[in-house]
Image: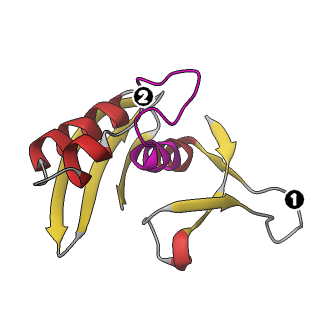
Amino acid sequence: MQTLSANVNNNVPNVAYDDIYLDAKGNISLSYDVEAVLQACAQAAQTVLGEIIFNVSQGIPFFQTIWNGSPQVQQYTAALRVAFLNVPNVIEVISLMTTQVNNDFQYTAIIRTTFGTGGISG
């Protein structure tokens, strides 16, 4: 698998991916295999339900699970798991932990792909 690489938000490793960037040689940076799948998973975790105009059923239902009234942590965690499993080349979500720190919801996931196993958080 190959995808465009994305800078990490505020240069904090494995947090949230932002924009594509140029590598040291001035070329658009590419990610391969495990790193590409993990980037796709991190981007899936940031996609709001209904945001993708050609498939409005994809995305995390942030409004329904987090932003509306009291947080529904179990539904949020389940939506993350489904989003990860829908990414091509993901075999299983080995571990998925979600936590609430003040008003922030965070996750840490270990994901097994067809290329190997890796972790992300956001």
Q: Label 2: state its secondary structure.
A: loop
Q: How crowded is mark 2: few (under 14 residues within 10 Å), some or many (20 or more)?
A: some
Rendered residue at 26%/58% (across/down)? 107
Looking at the picture, tell me which residue is in the foreground, 72 or 110: 72
Q: Disc 2 designates what residue?
A: 58
Percent across and percent down for residue 79 are: 25, 36
Residue 114 numbered tag: none
**100 left or right of 107?**
left
Magenta-drawn segment:
39-58
Q: Disc 1 designates what residue?
A: 27
Viewer-nearest of discs 1 and 2:
2
Looking at the picture, tell me which residue is in the foreground, 79 or 28: 79
Residue type of the residue flagged with mark 1: Asn
Furthest residue in direction right, as rendered: 26
Rendered residue at 87%/59% (across/down)? 27
Circle nearer the N terminus (1, 2): 1
Percent across and percent down for residue 106 are: 26, 63
Percent across and percent down for residue 23 are: 79, 66
Quadrant (top left, top right, bottom left, bottom right) of the C terminus: bottom left
- Which quadrant of the structure image shows residue 113? top left
- Decide: marks 1, 2 in contact (CB < 8 A)? no
Looking at the picture, tell me which residue is in the foreground, 74 or 42: 74
Quadrant (top left, top right, bottom left, bottom right) of the N terminus: top right
**Magenta segment includes 41:** yes
Residue type of the residue flagged with mark 2: Gln
